[in-house]
Amino acid sequence: MLTIAIVAMVSTEYWNQAGTTKTFGNPLELTWLAGVSRQASIVDYGCGYGRLAGELLAAGYTDIEGFDVSAPLIERAGQEHPAARFTVLEDPPRLPREDASVDVLLLFAVLTCVPDSDAQRGIIAEIRRVLKPGGLFYLSDYCLQEDERNRTRYRAQEARFGLYGMFETSDGAICRHHERAWLRELLTGFEVARERDVPVVTMNNNPAIATQFLARR
Ligand SMILES: C[S@@+](CC[C@H](N)C(=O)[O-])C[C@H]1O[C@@H](n2cnc3c(N)ncnc32)[C@H](O)[C@@H]1O
């Protein structure tokens, strides 16, 4: 538990500093939300500077709330997208929302920066708690990459972290790329409706493949 707390502290510091200079790019496939009412309650967990809220507002969705551990990112999100609501998460993964009160939950490139398996399970349990029965969980994250640059860093840092796929970036972010089976395990109990792999540019400007799931509670 102490290790989780230390990694979380380091992580928040990273997002408050280096994180504020980054551009995030995991793409939102709006057609996956076809059929979702424009008045639906949408929560973006780990919303960063509100990139996805901006896309949802532009598409006509009206009830969007973003949560993030980073106060500077939340402040920027509020300035750039005043029509959405943004809140700093004081006690992650606890969301200040009622049980079964959310129609759609987005979790984009957050698991990758919360590498501990138990911490990831905690986020997913919280998502399950706040989603309405039948609500949608849209997950976008990174499976293990197959290019040589990534494989080299997985191998080089496996002993340090005790997990193949976990690494520290050159600017100090501690990240995890996942076994696909692990992401599927996290989705146990959800009904997976869609899955795709999509090319992205990471926040450190490297090409990668993101994996996305649309799952129903
Ligand atoms: C790679 S960024 C992605 C931001 C946003 N989801 C997007 O795709 O534009 C990861 C975000 O997760 C946030 N984050 C990191 N650890 C978190 C945690 N334990 N709970 C909530 N947010 C967290 C960071 O502050 C950062 O904004």
Image: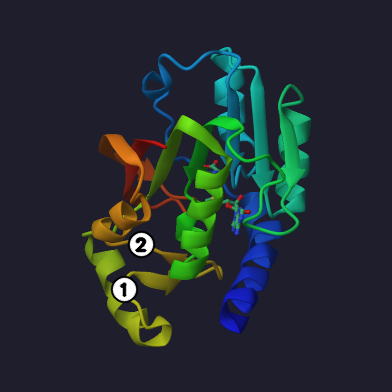
Instruction: Say how many tags the image has.
Output: 2
Mark 2 neighbour class, 10 Å CA radius: few under 14, some 14 to 19, many 20 or more:
many
Left-right relation of 123 to 190: right
Q: Is residue 15 above or below residue 63?
A: below
Q: How is the image coloured?
A: rainbow
Callout 2 amino acid: His
Tell which of 7 and 201 is nearer to you: 7
Q: Is residue 145 visible?
A: no
Left-right relation of 196 to 78: left
Report the disc number at residue 177.
2
Task: Please tell me whether mark 1 or mark 2 is closer to you in this view.
Answer: 2
Residue drawn at x 45%, y 58% is: 112
Residue drawn at x 42%, y 37% is: 217
Mark 1 neighbour class, 10 Å CA radius: few under 14, some 14 to 19, many 20 or more:
many
- Can you give x and y, in whole percent of width and height, for residue 188 in the image? 33, 51
- Can you give x and y, in whole percent of width and height, for residue 16 in the image? 71, 58
